[in-house]
Image (tube, rainbow, N blue to C red):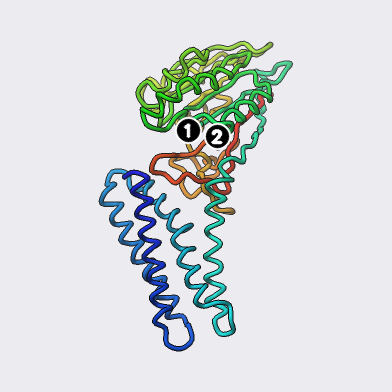
């Protein structure tokens, strides 16, 4: 089910709610009361229920994203529009104050939705964290790991350029790219290959730049986008990098972290010589769950969750699409099963049928310092 269809469904729901509110207020006899507001809300709820059933029937395999998109459009469009009609008929006069205030509060959902769509997704920040290494891997200078995850865009704009500029300004020794570069159609991809290569070709670090494939990096899309950039794709393999007096072993897991070849990479990485720093990069943070508690790995870097994109203060992300704890999926550096796991909140956001919003989860580029 495409985004145009979801938008049409949401628009029809809005019309149903507005019509219900207008009809109830037009036919009132005497003062406006709870009954009139209830009719408007019932009309809106009934239309929303019909829309939800229609979406589930049409998008049988993956209804969650279109349902979420429709819920966002209805909540931030249809509900405020209905509330405006109720507010216009009720006003804030004596005897109608509670109903009027309730409608006014629902109207506030519209600017919240606008902020979530047009402001919050671009409030990029640099997220910094530090990992203390075992004494066996001590060295003179710290090692800075730069992280650019989940660009997940259909085109390169000044926003993506700024993300790369801000990451390079941190002067990382190594840059890791945990997948999900482009999410769009083949036609959109063809028009953006050159722009992607120019952007990603800017990524430079003394120890190199390494990427793994993500959910939207289907077929050979990542190969096409990274051609000529100097970025190396780690398809279940390990590279050894020298940074000053430190030796780093960086392993990369493909999208699926459970197959034997992925397990073998993690086993080989944890069995590295005791004086070598061990880092695993994977798109999904679930790869961290593949290590045994006794495995000697220093850092796992992942993306995928976008910090949930929408979070509730005090609770965290509403959806994480991962088995790691909710607190870790929210982003940043955490300890999971005895290992340091850094989950980037990402630069971009889910597209296609998903609602393209962020709320209480700022996008970021990351820098993890190993001391």
> Which dot marks residue 59?
none
**Residue at figure coordinates x 47%, y 33% from the top left:** 152
The quadrant the N terminus occupies is: top left
- For mark 1, give the secondary structure: loop
Residue at the extreme front: 26
User: Label 2 crowding class (10 Å Cα cut-off): few <14, some 14-19, many 20+?
Assistant: many
184 in relation to 208, above or below: below
Earlier-in-chain disc, 1 versus 2: 1
Residue 305 horizontal/vertical position (percent): 49, 39
Question: Which residue does the image show at 41% across and 26% down from the upper left?
Answer: 189
Which x, y percent locates residue 284?
46, 32
Can residue 326 be seen from the camera position used here? yes
Query: Mark 1 sits on what residue?
Result: 152
> Rounded to the nearest whole Å, what is the CA distance between mark 1 and mark 2?
8 Å
Which residue is drawn at the image coordinates 47% and 82% (left, top)? 33
Name which quarter of the figure residue 11 lies in.
bottom left
Cβ atoms under marks 1 and 2 closer than 8 Å: yes
Q: Residue at x 56, y 13 (%)?
A: 273
Figure quadrant of residue 264: top left
How far from the left and from the top, in percent, is residue 67? 37, 51
Secondary element type, mark 2:
loop
Q: Residue furthest right?
A: 140
In the visual, does 127 lie left or right of 269? Answer: right
Q: Is residue 7 left or right of residue 89?
A: left
Q: Which residue is mark 2?
A: 347
Whole-percent x, y for residue 58 in the image: 26, 49
Q: How many marks?
A: 2
């Amino acid at each position: 089910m495409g985004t145009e269809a979801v938008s049409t469904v949401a628009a029809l729901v809005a019309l149903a709610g507005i019509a219900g509110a207008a009809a109830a207020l037009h036919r009132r006899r005497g003062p406006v009361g709870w009954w009139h507001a209830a009719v408007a809300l019932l009309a809106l709820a009934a239309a929303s229920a019909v829309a939800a059933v229609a979406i589930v029937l049409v998008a049988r395999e993956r209804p969650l994203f279109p349902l979420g998109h429709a819920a966002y459009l209805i909540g931030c469009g249809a509900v405020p529009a209905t509330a405006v009609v109720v507010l216009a008929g009720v006003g804030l006069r004596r005897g109608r104050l509670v109903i009027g205030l309730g409608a006014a509060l629902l109207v506030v959902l519209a600017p919240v939705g606008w902020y979530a769509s047009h402001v919050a997704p671009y409030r990029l920040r640099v997220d910094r964290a530090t990992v203390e290494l075992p004494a066996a891997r001590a060295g003179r200078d710290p090692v800075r790991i730069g992280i650019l995850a989940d660009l997940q865009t259909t085109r390169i704009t000044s926003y993506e350029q700024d993300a790369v500029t801000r990451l390079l300004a941190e002067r990382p020794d190594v840059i890791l790219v945990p997948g999900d570069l482009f999410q769009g159609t083949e036609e959109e991809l063809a028009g953006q290959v050159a722009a992607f290569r120019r952007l990603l070709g800017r990524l430079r670090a003394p120890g190199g730049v390494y990427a793994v494939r993500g959910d939207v990096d289907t077929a050979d899309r990542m190969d096409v986008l990274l051609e000529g950039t100097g970025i190396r794709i780690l398809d279940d393999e390990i590279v050894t990098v020298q940074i000053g007096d430190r030796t780093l072993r960086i392993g990369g897991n493909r999208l699926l972290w459970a197959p034997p070849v992925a397990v073998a990479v993690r086993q080989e990485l944890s069995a590295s010589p005791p004086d070598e720093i061990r880092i695993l990069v994977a798109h999904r943070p679930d790869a961290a769950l593949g290590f045994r508690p006794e495995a000697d790995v220093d850092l796992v870097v992942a993306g995928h969750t976008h910090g949930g994109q929408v979070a509730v203060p005090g609770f965290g992300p509403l959806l994480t699409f991962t088995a790691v704890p909710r607190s870790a999926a929210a982003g940043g550096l955490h300890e999971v099963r005895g290992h340091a796991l850094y989950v980037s909140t990402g630069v971009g956001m889910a597209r296609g049928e998903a609602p393209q919003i962020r709320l209480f989860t700022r996008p970021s580029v990351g820098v993890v310092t190993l001391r």
